[in-house]
Amino acid sequence: QAALDDWGFIAPQLEALSLRLNAGRAPNSFDFVAKNCMAPLPRAFQRVHAYAYPNHLALLHQAEQTELPAGFLHEPLMY
């Protein structure tokens, strides 16, 4: 996640490391074993709102002084 958050800075360093690894010139390198790996991003950081009750949605939009989305009674809403 940290690499994605600062991709402009870290991408060139990761590319250089990849080239050294593939050429067999990276210090402390070892053979890649896929079964020893976990998902690269086990959880993504996010904030999700989902609404099941129209009254709750109406109160939130009233508090935020925003318009209710069109079709909110018939379509699931998540943002």
Image: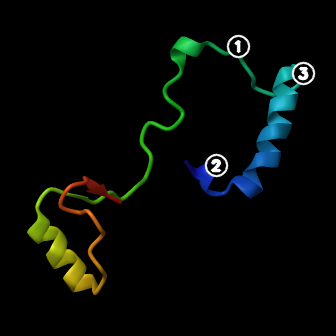
Name the image quarter holding the C terminus: bottom left
Q: Which residue is mark 1?
A: 31
Residue at the image position 53 percent from the left and 16 percent from the top? 36
Q: Amino acid at mark 2?
A: Ala
Figure quadrant of residue 74? bottom left
Q: Around disc 1, counting alpha carbons within 10 Å, would you say few (fewer than 14), some (14 to 19), or many (20 or more)?
A: few
Q: Amino acid at mark 3?
A: Ala
Separation of disc 3 and disc 2 at Cα? 23 Å
Which is nearer the N-term, disc 3 or disc 1? 3
Contact, CB < 8 Å: mark 3 with mark 2? no
Figure quadrant of residue 51? bottom left
Model colouring: rainbow
The image shows residue 76, relative to residue 27, as above or below, that is: below
The image shows residue 74, relative to residue 37, as above or below, that is: below
Residue at the image position 77 percent from the left and 41 percent from the top? 14
In the structure shown, which secondary structural element does the residue marked by tag 1 occupy?
loop
Question: Which numbered disc covers residue 3?
Answer: 2
Q: Which x, y percent locates residue 53?
A: 11, 61
Q: Which x, y percent locates residue 18?
A: 80, 31
Would residue 41 appear left or right of 48 to someone viewing this image? right
Q: Name the residue nearer the viewer: 63 or 77.
A: 77
Q: Which residue is mark 3?
A: 23
Q: Amino acid at mark 1?
A: Asp
Which is nearer the N-term, disc 3 or disc 2? 2
Would residue 21 appear left or right of 6 to someone viewing this image? right
Residue at the image position 49 percent from the left and 25 percent from the top? 38
